[in-house]
Image (cartoon, coloured by chain):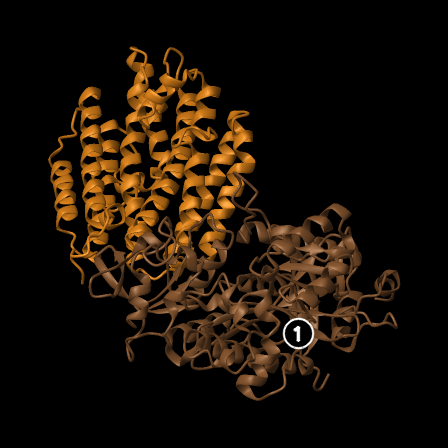
Amino acid sequence: MLSRVAESLYWMTRYLERAENTARLINSSTQVLLDLPKGASFGWDVLIRVVGLDQQVRERGIKLDEASIMAFLIEDEDNPSSILSSIHYARENTRTFREVLPMEIWERINGLYLYIRQNAKRATHGRSERYEVLDGVIERRQSIIGLLAGSMSHDIAYQFLKLGRNLERADMTTRIVDVNSAVVLPTDAVLAVPAMERLWMSTLNALSAYQMYRRHVGVHVRQQDVVRFLLKDPHFPRTVHHCLSEIEGCLADLPAHEQAMNATRQAFRRLDSMQLENLAPVVLHEYLDQVQADLDAIHSAVTRQYFYLHHNPVTQSSQSQ
Amino acid sequence: MNIICKDYRLNEAFDELIGPDREPRPAARPLFDYLAGLDPSTLNDRRKAVEAAIMTMGITFTVYSDAGNIDRAWPFDIVPRIIARKEWQRIDEGLKQRLKALNMFINDLYNDQLIVKDGVFPIEVLEGSKNFRAQCKGITPRFGVWAHVCGTDLVRDKDGTVYVLEDNLRVPSGVSYMLENRQLMKRMFPEIFQTATILPVDDYPTRLHDTLAALSPREGERPVIVVLTPGIYNSAYFEHSYLAQQMGAFLVEGSDLVVKDDDHVYMKTISGLRRVDVIYRRIDDDFLDPEAFRPDSALGVPGLMRAWRAGKVGIANAPGAGVADDKVVYSFVPKMIQYYLGEEPILPNVPSYLCMYDDQRDYVLANLDQLVIKPANESGGYGMLIGPRSSKEERAQFADLIRENPRNYMAQPTLSISTAPTLINDKLSPRHLDLRPFVLQSDQMYVTTGGLTRVAMKEGSLVVNSSQGGGSKDTWIVDMEGV
């Protein structure tokens, strides 16, 4: 596998995962909003903070109302993390390694790109159209994953795809969990408790996790149970724990994986040691930041090990195999 | 069907599908029987479906001047061009004969130059050749073959004769469109493939792979084959990627490769450097190796020529093969066939006038309004003058160009190249076309079944190049035995 191609595969799948998760994040936040009781408030700007784009928004003087923020996150071509840009980058990356993927994958990715290009504007019109368009993104992205799993040899190229997907997914899961820190609930407990419950239900829904949570954890939706489930459950495919296991599996199939593997185990150990009972919102936020930092360390180790040759000139006497 | 044929306006050109009696030619009859069974709106619906499929499949062709937008759908016409198998067999033999002679010629030029010594090929032509590479002198690549992949352009004149228009021996492109066009037709018109005997085209990638694999310096092992592309901004990038995918080869850019002290070529992989055996390069000679050719090239691989000369890597087409891809050299191909093979050419050349010879140049200058003037080394239809359609100023400008550099120009009579029905605004109208079959040679030879038919989408236009508003059609070789 060429270094350059491995890196493109890795980023292509990160971009696609980012697009899908941004769509999920927006849809779930909209749900949260609908369910909030009188007296509660929600700031759309939290979405910007959660995806780490607050600085860009400030510098560009983007307004913090719903319509502006939606345009920024969905169709803004100057925002490299917008859904449209992410899918565009994924497609451009795919161009450079179409030969390693089954032909239909390119067609689907191209199809997803054409879809969002045609519909991105419509998604900013109103909440119901937005839901429908973003749901279309999620659905198309899911069909790409399904096609990959079923029609591509689980070879080295596949491991890089999976690696990128799981790193991005774990990262986005922590960010989606973090959204709830932006909600200020009424002080009246009679209103606050059910509101809280609905809030976390929306989070579970955003990650398509509600049904599995009910089956494996219970019918009561409490913050500490939900957070524990989304961070530590080993079986649900969008939890941090599960993603780390997947990353471990990918790395095991790659050559010279020691450093990246160490970084992954470090992330695992830290996750295991987190006490999630009766967590203050501030502590939860710090925990989530920590997980994100650990994921970034894995990313750095992967970059150093596998993409190095692509970024650096080879001298005549350097190592060959 | 009657309606389709009655409305169809034949002109003086030969039509590939409709005879002078306004009836479909025998090989095209199954197609017209099929079309007769469709109602007109169906045809239009299918055309729209094809256009949508082209968008999703991302079959695109970049045009150099389309700044900003790196792809654009390449027009595809749903009416195929049809040739009877019997006629094709003769063309197939003619193409093999031609490439065999061309390869013997290139090898001779870089070694003993017997054809020059024997007075068959004038030394002046060789001396004026832009594509002769002194760096290749004294080399005989494996099998004596330099041009492993050749795209030969054919046209049919009004009397029905098929002529060779040019031999593309550098980095000919278009074969992926031939393959994709067939895929599109099978998707959209599966019924007709059940009733007519249309020969398949899809073994090309396998044959290309075998042609390349035969060049591997490490015999007995599964060779590592790479397709070397200039990158995604090249007009044929789609094809480079497509062929790599179809052959299971690596698609590499110059920066992915490195030549080390041991003269081996390596590619940069996630687990270090890995040896490369064969390079199917889609980069021009000039950019291939900054050590040997243009020092400012960022696309190439320093040391590649060294590795090739040392026999450590196979390169297709070999550096220097372009010496025979020259419109002046072209006019000597019939003589080469006689000289090297002792055979008569099966496929004729278009009569050509070389401006380097005084008498021929005088004729050309006196008849600029009748002739097509071509520069020796351009491709893609650039820098041509089509006499009958030119203005006085253009002719004067070309006369100056010819006098300044006579070796660089040749002229041919304006052929009335053939037409085929093409769907334009829901109606079939005649449009001019040519045909580019692809010919392979290493230890064996192979010709594609048909090739890429390019069609000038503008009424009356003779320029079929994709870079100048051309489109393409599927090409059917139809077996008439037992029909």
Q: Please name whichever residue, B161 or B412, is drawn nearer the observer in this view of the structure.
A: B412
Q: Which of the chains bears the disc numbered 1?
A: B
The answer to which image quadrant residue B360 occupies is bottom right
Residue A154: which quarter of the image?
A: bottom left
Tell me, yes or no, if residue B268 can be seen here: yes
* B212 sits to left or right of A132: left
Query: Can you say whether B437 is above or below A83 in the image?
Result: below
Q: Element under label 1? A: loop
Number of marks in the rendered image: 1
Quadrant including the C terminus of chain B: bottom right
Spot occupied by residue B331 in the image (x, y as percentages of width and height): 62, 72
In the picture, measured across the screen, residue B165 lies left or right of residue A136, that is: right
Q: Is residue A194 visible?
A: no
Identified at 74% across, 46% down, the residue is B393
Who is closer to the viewer here, A273 or B319?
B319
Q: How far from the left and from the top, in percent, is residue B239?
A: 49, 58
The 10 Å Cα crowd at callout 1, few under 14, some 14 to 19, many 20 or more, is some
* Furthest-bottom residue in this view: B342
Residue B347 coordinates in the image, percent (x, y): 65, 78
Rendered brown, the chain in question is B
Q: Nearer the viewer, residue B482 or B5?
A: B5
Residue A243, position as x, y percentages in the image: 25, 44
User: Splitting the image into 4 quarters, where does residue B250 fall?
Assistant: bottom left
| Colour orange, chain | A
Q: Which residue type carries mark 1?
A: Asn
**For mark 1, what is the residue?**
B349
Relative to A312, does residue A81 appear above or below in the rendering?
Answer: above
